[in-house]
Image (cartoon, rainbow, N blue to C red):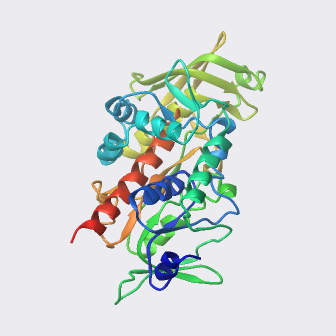
Amino acid sequence: MDGNNQRQSAGPAKLVIVGGGAAGMFAAAVAAERGVPCVLVERKARLGSKVLMTANGRCNFAKDISPEQFLKDISRGGIAARCAEFVAEAVRECPPRQICRGFQSLGVRTKRMTDGRIFPADEKAATIVHAFGDLLRDEEVPIVTNCPVKEIAAVKGGAARFAIVANSFSILAENVLLATGGASYPKTGSVGDGQRFAQALGHRLIPYRPGLIGLETRDEKVTRLAGRRFEDGAAKVFDASDKAVFEYRGEIDCERFGLSGAAIYNAQRFIEHWMRERGAAARLSAEVSFGRETVRLDSLRPRPLKEAIVTIGGVDTKEVDPHTMQSKIVPGLYFAGEVMDIDGPTGGYNLTLAFATARKAVASIAKKEKTP
C-alpha cells in the first residue's frame, strides 16, 4: 500500500459506489478519470454479472443514434415522458456515440448492426466487463466483491456523511453512489437493496413492474410453434376504442409460455407505462404477427418480474436532481442507473442510461470537490 492510499485510509472515503454492474463500473471508471478517490463495493463474487447476460451474452451496449432520437425512443407512443425529461441532460452529455468511442479507446473493437445497435466486435459481453476490469486494475481503484451491504446509515458530525455497513466491517464515506440496479434477475445481484437503502434514508419508491419481458398466452398458434423465431415480426397495441397506439417491428420468439423477442418486449414496456400512467381501468389489447400467423391478445399477462430485462419503478426521480443525480433529500447521496425509476426500450438503451447517469453523478461530485 503506497503513501497516498495510507493517507486516504485515515479518513472517510471520498466516494463509495455500491453496486458493481454497468452503472457502478462506469462510475468507478469516471471517478478514476476525474481524480475522485473511490471504493467500489459489489455483493456478488465478480463484477458485471448482469452485463454478462445482456443480449444473450452479446452485450448490445449502445445504439448509433443522436441523443434527441434516443430521448424520443424512450417516450415513443406518449409514455415515460418524465423519464426522458429527467435523463435528457445526462444523455446529451454522454451520448451513445461517445460511449462507443470510449470503449474503443480501451481497445474494444465494436460492431454496428444495420439497425444501429452496437456490440463488441466479438459479440461477447465478457469483453466489456474485462475492459472495465483492466481499467480499474490499472487505475488501482479499490474493489470489494462478495460483499453484500447491509445498511447505509447517515452519520452526523465530521467529514463523513455515511456509514456503509457490511457483515464484517463498515466504511465511512463523504459521498455514496447507489448503482445497485433494479429488482429483476436476483441471481445477478439485482435484489432491490439500493432502493431499500434509499427508502430508509427518506426516499419514496415507485412500485416495481416488469419491463421488457414476454407475454403469456395459450393460443395454439403460438404454443405449437414453441422454439421458433421469426425475425420480421410485428406487435401492435390497441386502446379501448381499438385505435392502434403503438407498433414495433422486430424479432418474435414463440415460447411454451407464449411470446418473447424484441417486438414483444417493447410492446410490453409500452403497455406497462400506459397502464401506470392512465390507471388500471385503461384497457389495452395487442395483435402480434409472425410468419403467416396473427394472434390477438386481449388478456395481457407479463412474465414475472424476476425474469424481466429491466425493472420499471424504483427511486422516484422527482426526489433526484437531474443536473447532478444527487438526492434532493439527503446531501451526498447519488443515484445511477436502474435503481431509479428510469428505463428504456430494448436495443442498448438501458446500458446507455446506466452509463450516462453514472457519468453525470461522478462528474458532479468531481465538480463539487473542486469548488472552494
Q: Looking at this view, is 237 or 298 the one in front? A: 237
State left or right for residue 78 relative to residue 227: left
Q: Which x, y percent locates residue 138? A: 58, 57
Q: Which x, y percent locates residue 280? A: 43, 45
Q: Quadrant of the N terminus?
A: bottom right
Residue 7 lies, with reference to residue 228, above or below; the image says: below
Residue 251 lies, with reference to residue 20, above or below; the image says: above
Query: Residue at left 56%, top 33%?
Result: 265
Query: Residue at left 36%, top 37%?
Result: 79
Q: Is any part of residue 279 visible from this angle?
A: no
How many callouts does the rendering have?
A: 0
Q: Quadrant of the C terminus?
A: bottom left
State left or right for residue 214 relative to residue 206: right
Residue that sits furthest to the left in the current view: 372
Q: Which x, y percent locates residue 7? A: 47, 82
Residue that sits furthest to the top in the current view: 292
Q: Looking at this view, is 109 or 194 the one in front? A: 109
Query: Residue at left 65%, top 71%?
Result: 147
Residue 305 lies, with reference to residue 332, above or below; the image says: above
Residue that sits furthest to the bottom in the current view: 157
Q: Which x, y percent locates residue 248? A: 49, 23
Q: Is any part of residue 291 visible from this angle?
A: yes
